Amino acid sequence: MMTEPKGRVLLVTSGKELLDEMTPSMSGRGLELVCVPTLKYAAARLDTGDCSAMVVDFSRVAPAERDAFLALHKQYPTVHLFTLETVASLAPTMPSSLRRLSWPLPMGIADQIRVTSSPVVVLADQVLFMTGAVQIAFRQAGVQPASLESPKDLPDFIRQQSEARISASQRTAKPKKAWSLLGGTEEESIEAELLPGNMVVAQFIGTMKEADALDAGIRSAFPEAVCYYVSGTDIVRYAVQSLKDGYYVALPRDQVGRIAGILIETTEGADIRLKGRETERILLLDNLKPAMTPLGQALQGAGYEVTSTTDGEEALGLCKKGAFHLAVIGTSATSDQYSGAELAQKMREHDPDLRIIFMVDQYPLQAALKGVSQVVELGLDDAILKPVEASRLIFSVEKALERRFLMQENARLLIETQELNRQLAAVNGFQKNFFATVAHDVKSPLTAILGYSEVLTTKLKGQPSEGRYASNIFTSAKTLNVLISDLVDLAAIESGKLRVEIGTLNLISVVNDVRSRVEIAAQKRKIDFAVEVPPVLPPLAGDDARIGQVVQNLCTNAIQYTKEGGKVTIKVETALDQVVVSVIDTGIGISKEDLPRVWERFFQTKEAQGMRKAGFGLGLKIAREIVLRHGGEMGIESELGVGSRFFFHLPVKK
């Protein structure tokens, strides 16, 4: 079942490098990464229900936990699961349930299988099995696999193979009399005999669920057995189909950058985009029909729509009449007017997006070199030497079609991005104009309101009712003035004109001034307000008013988000060549997910929105900018429901 991404992806790994590697592709698609180190933390996080996918780095997970993660996925079937494998985690010495091998085989995996004594079963999809591609790949690495057309015979075959190996290893040869006559001993020696292999490649055309069941049956009968599944299907197709089926996706670790794109392809809108890939049409042109027939059949078996011809003119006409996604051209195929290379150029002129693969004759050598060089000159996708193996052609076709798809997607996304940038520029322009208007046109009349309401409050002291009205006007105007001041400061920051007048900073005086202004608010809320300042501080450079603005902002927030009976503390400490100012509270705290966003303009946590009386959520952004202008930095430590510590440091004046 396809689900809309919730925007949050859980990454399980004990290293930081994978988080750094995945973050750009995730954030670029509006997805947020949350990293945890172990199975225990992953289970707790999934229980919150806010993750749409989980990525598990099996190279950093204990082997005993592999199956536990798969079981966890079954508890949360709507959460997409991606497992990342390396050659080390795929090794047959690592106990595990069925594992998927990418095609071509990962470098080094055949060598590891060659030296293992455990029974090894490789379930190969129909195309790879029928073309013998998997068997050939292992033989080239020194492994001699047996082949089975049906996986149902696997248990009996493994048993017979194991018994044959035991029997062969126990057989001994008769004494070599010639050796005895020459002075040798009468000890028996084992005849040089090739033991039966411990590996079998079986054709498998079922579902992954059926493959899992087969693997479980084999390992139940032979606990030491190791099972793999290998398919030549393109990674994106395989992944999207697996997620549709509610199955997990196993990827090579070096393909981790594709996960974000795969998740986007699981959305409803992506189904429409992928429909074009489901009926990809291939034009197959060669002058040898007997060689084309098995290639065409193999491509059809891989799910493509294939049109074959031995006539170059007909091929060119077909390209002009109907849209093909890819053309496979034998370079020896010519028409009365054009060579194979010229046909490729004509086809590209008609459809610039057409992907083209050359099949090049090996002899004569000059012709082969010319055909390969033309691929580079013409910007084609690949050159394959004849005779062409079906598996090699399918692999090349998949890569070329994936390239076509990605190029078209990039073009579509570029147009969408340009439109979004245009809209964003319009919104930003409106915001800047709005802030400028507020800063210049609202500030002046507001100053008059503040002044006159203060005068009225003084003159109406003897008239309680009228005096109360004037006092309310003055209080509301002061609140509005704070909001307007924030907008004015933000406008100054956006334009790079925030004024900070650096002079000799009296931090102790600044803290005491803030204390006198905010402790009344703390007393009204029955909050214990404390100040811890050393009697003497090293010399500091800064703007008293601006640093006071920072400290007051932190104290106001702390008091506002701390419940009655809580505590707020201003603490000033010296450390090496800097002074650290902290505002510590026992308030509502901030969740780990929201911590990175507290510096964003207009951002407020859900908890804060429920308690906040007034404000735009600009105070922390402005405070941090002021601290940065002083050559310092601001930080935060917080735990939801426990409290927070906002702090900033200022360099000591030298």
Image: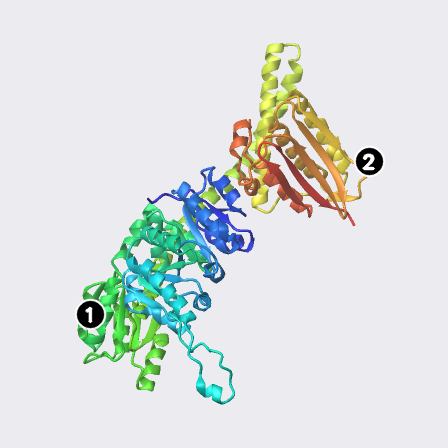
Task: Tell me which amino acid carries mark 2.
Answer: Pro
Mark number displayed over residue 308: 1
502 lies above or below 89: above
Give residue 74's quadrant in the image: top left
46 lies above or below 186: above
Mark number displayed over residue 295: none
Nearer-N-terminus badge (1/2) = 1
Residue 558 in view here: yes
- Left or right: residue 523 versus residue 410 is right
Residue 628 placement (x, y as % from top left): 65, 46
Q: How many marks?
A: 2
Asked which secondary structure carries label 2, the reply is loop
Residue 199 placement (x, y as % from top left): 38, 65
Q: Residue at x 43, y 45 (%)?
A: 71
Name the residue tied to disc 2: 535
Residue 501 in view here: no
